[in-house]
Amino acid sequence: MLTGDLLRVRFRKGEIHLPYIDDLEPDHLGVAESLIRIFERHEGGTRQELDEELADTTGAGTEFLFHRGLSKLLKDRCTFASATPVDPVDLRRRIFEGAAAAYRDTEQVRIDREAVLTEAAKSAAIGAELVEGAFYADLREAERLASFKSCTPGWLLSRYNVALAQAVLLRASELDLYIEGESPARYRDLFRKMKFFRLLHEIRQTGPGKYHIRLDGPMSLFKSSQRYGLQIAQFLPSVLHCGQWRVAASVIWGARRREGVLKLTPETGLKPIGPSTGQWIPEEVVWLEDRFARLKTDWHIAAGAEVVDLGGEGVLVPEYVFTHPPTGMKVYLEFLGYWRSSGVRTRLDLLSRHGPPNMILAISSELSVDEEASTGIPGEVYAYRRTPVARDILKILNDMVDEHPGASPGTLDLFSPKTV
């Protein structure tokens, strides 16, 4: 990810313009290839040695920010580690104690440096030849490049263009995404991506296969959050896998808090920087699936594969769908994600009016939703503290079976909500 000091933002008539580069330009490809080779050569070397060569390469010309930006993206693909067989702090203590003892020895004309280092190495049970390298091995400059995930010059340039837009989205106050013409599977993955990145969002269906999605940005929160800004920026690559879309993000930029709009469309030229891997799922949700699968029950759990329309005012993208073969019941599990209080009220109101009855709404206690606010929700409401408990979910499911003893796919139409 790029930081704000690595790009130059220009404002024209209230719109933000970024210095995207031509990822097919031979000179740009040459720069990218040179930088990649530097990182490959320095694998196993120190961070300081790498930084010194990068400083000599990037220079201070007109392309300075471009070169530094590429270097930053390549560093994000590195793993640095402190490679030492002994704790550097403990080794320094031994060396300084030995030097102090030698200084107090009045029989010595001068302090024998090599003798002090050799004695410290002996007491630390390491070879004397390793002392020099381990002395300050815990300092950042002395860290070694343990591994570097290489890439092609073309990919790096495409990644740079996407990173420019992401750096601006880190300071968005809100983002509007208009998308159409995608498959239900693509929509499902996109909606779940937003949800599991815990983005504050509203989804409205504006026509057949058309959606308007509004995301609150980090600058709209009561206290802007760097972590939340990173999550909204990380969501952008998911959009790039779609065909027909446009983004309009309101941004507050710089120390002067200048306001502008960043507009993105497929014509902007941003390219996907990785495969479409589906949705990221939080640990607590994965944990629930694993625990539920261990229970002895007729209920089956599977990842949600549907997008349920909520009266044209929004959608329900369930995390999981539970099926009960003996009765044919199907029950959706929806987690109320990362919301502000106003967003919680809006979501609960929408679910109370259009939510399906075969739904379990799981609400974290961190959202501080009072019981009265959730009384009108169809289906069942499950409040949990840190993580949902599989046995609690199973009890709710079994109670639903008891309430509908004659349930079957043919007799319980209410358990077949409309999907889009």
Image (cartoon, grey):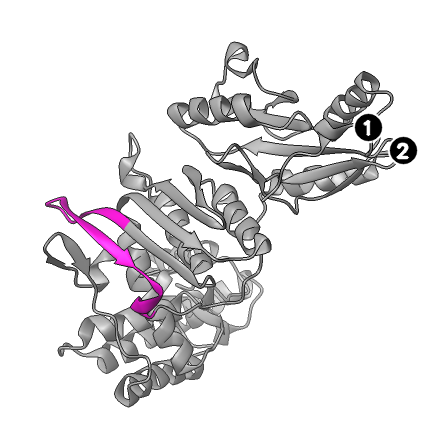
Q: Which residues are magenta?
A: 249-269
Q: Quarter of the image containing the N terminus?
A: bottom left
Q: Which mark is residue 241?
A: none
Q: Is residue 198 above or below residue 327?
A: below
Q: Residue at x 28, y 77 (%)?
A: 54
Mark 2–mark 1 distance (CA, rounded to whole Å): 13 Å
Q: Residue at x 58, y 19 (%)?
A: 377
Query: Disc 2 designates what residue?
Result: 326
The front one of 304 and 294 is 304
SS type, badge 2: loop
Residue 266 on image: x %, y %: 35, 65
Q: Is residue 41 above or below residue 265?
A: below
Query: Disc 1 designates what residue?
Result: 411
The front one of 87 and 217 is 217
Residue 177 on image: x %, y %: 37, 49
**Which mark's residue is nearer the viewer, 2 or 1?**
1
SS type, badge 1: loop
Q: Quarter of the image containing the C terminus?
A: top right
Residue 244 vs residue 301: left or right? left
The kind of residue tagged 2 is Pro
Q: Is residue 247 above or below residue 162?
A: above
